[in-house]
Image (cartoon, rainbow, N blue to C red):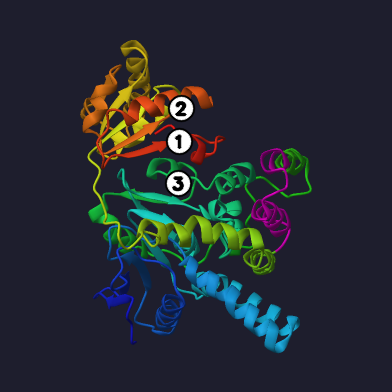
Amino acid sequence: MNLTNFRFETDEQGVAVATWDMPGRSMNVITTEVGEELLLIIEEVAANAAIKGCVIASGKDSFSGGADLSMLENFGKEYAKLRKSKGEEEAASFFFEKARSLSLLYRRLETCGKPFAAAIQGSCLGGGFELALACHFRVMADDDKTRVGLPEIKVGLFPGAGGTQRIARLMPTGDALQMMFKGEQIRPQAAKGMGLVQALAKREDVVSAAKKWISDGGKGVQPWDDPKFRLPSGKVYSPAGMQIWPPANAIYRRETNDNYPAAKALLQSVFEGLQLPMDLALKVESRYFAHILRSKEAAAMIRTLFLSMGELNKGARRPASVPPISLKTIGVVGAGFMGAGIAYVSALAGLEVVLLDRTIEEAEKGKAHSHKLMTDQVMKGRAKTADRDALLARIAPSADYAVLGGCDLVIEAVFEDPKLKAEVIGKISSVIGKDCILASNTSTLPISGLGKAS
């Protein structure tokens, strides 16, 4: 096999390991080329009698961040060109096949007759987690950096490579819907308790644990392909089902006001899919996915939240005459809800923060917000006491505008009153240096008007 994105090796016991390690990238993502190589691996494992099964592992710190969204955007561009040259019918057929290609690939993996196991470490999200779900066994690194999840809803999409159908067959329907609607990232212990993975191991042992499962006789059959399989929450049209679906529909409408097509399509995919055999259910999911992928809402969210965000972070709109700067100390004026939150995330990012308010007591109260948030993280085991102490040491409460003189950036975050903001901006302007950036946290007042006070 001629592979660029994977390394493929087989040990003496006949257990293969496909190590996903894309060159030139810090994170594995799903591209057309990755799909083509994965199909080669699946067919090799299925056809080679000397291979018992295959472990899919990562050569990077994380398993996968999911699909390359620029690839999905390109599908839309190809569809538009084909529609113009060949007509809607041919373009729609092309787009549907493109949209379901990953779903078909994963279905081929789970029905090839040989066991596949996923060795998960770091982030395993979106289409990457859908790949793991198609594997017959999943072992997850039991550490703070490892997460699994399906966050597609956050970029205007929903899981379209079998995720809606496999998740809804692994756990109670209500839990499955909640997980996908929220786009949650699940920690190891919770993932095992929810049935998303079958085993946990130390990071350095995940591959060996996956190999052992295959060596010990792991079967290449998914639960939903067993004739005796029963849905965790029972049939859709049953007394139990009727306790799930009407409330789920009501919650969807309450939370979205019917403005998020992807959330509606997700709900419909699960509702219809759970009434069908797996292959037909996947086809239903693919039809909804193709429809959403072509929607203006998904296109706008992918562009704004992913593609344009990447360009923004790289400084694509930076004027050529303005060099990059490095912030070390920022000032936040106004220690209320917004100001305290800005101080927290800034200190969390490693910046020194001056938190200023009318009195030192009010400024201290704003700092206490960070203490509470970090204490919650400590109680949940997500941070250490030393982390909390270090963050709090980076926040300096004050009631003296003069301390803003050493800041690289000052953000005013006082109440949304134009007179108050103008007064505060004037005071800030009188003490900061000529190279300091003065910003406003306003959400309703024109920034041009506030700028006149500086």
First in sequence: mark 2 vs mark 1? 2
Residue name at image x 30 percent, y 77 percent: 8
Residue 12 on image: x %, y %: 24, 76
Residue 224 seen in the figure: no
Q: Is residue 44 magenta?
A: no
The residue tagged 3 is 185
Q: Are marks 2 and 1 in contact (CB under 8 Å)?
A: yes
Which mark's residue is nearer the viewer, 3 or 1?
Answer: 1
Task: Classify mark 1: helix, strand or loop.
Answer: loop
Q: Which residues are magenta?
A: 251-276
Residue 36 seen in the figure: yes
Image quarter where the C terminus lies is top left
Residue 364 on image: x %, y %: 32, 16
The residue tagged 2 is 422
The residue tagged 1 is 452
Q: Which of the 4 image quarters holds residue 90?
A: bottom right
Separation (CA) of disc 2 from disc 1: 8 Å
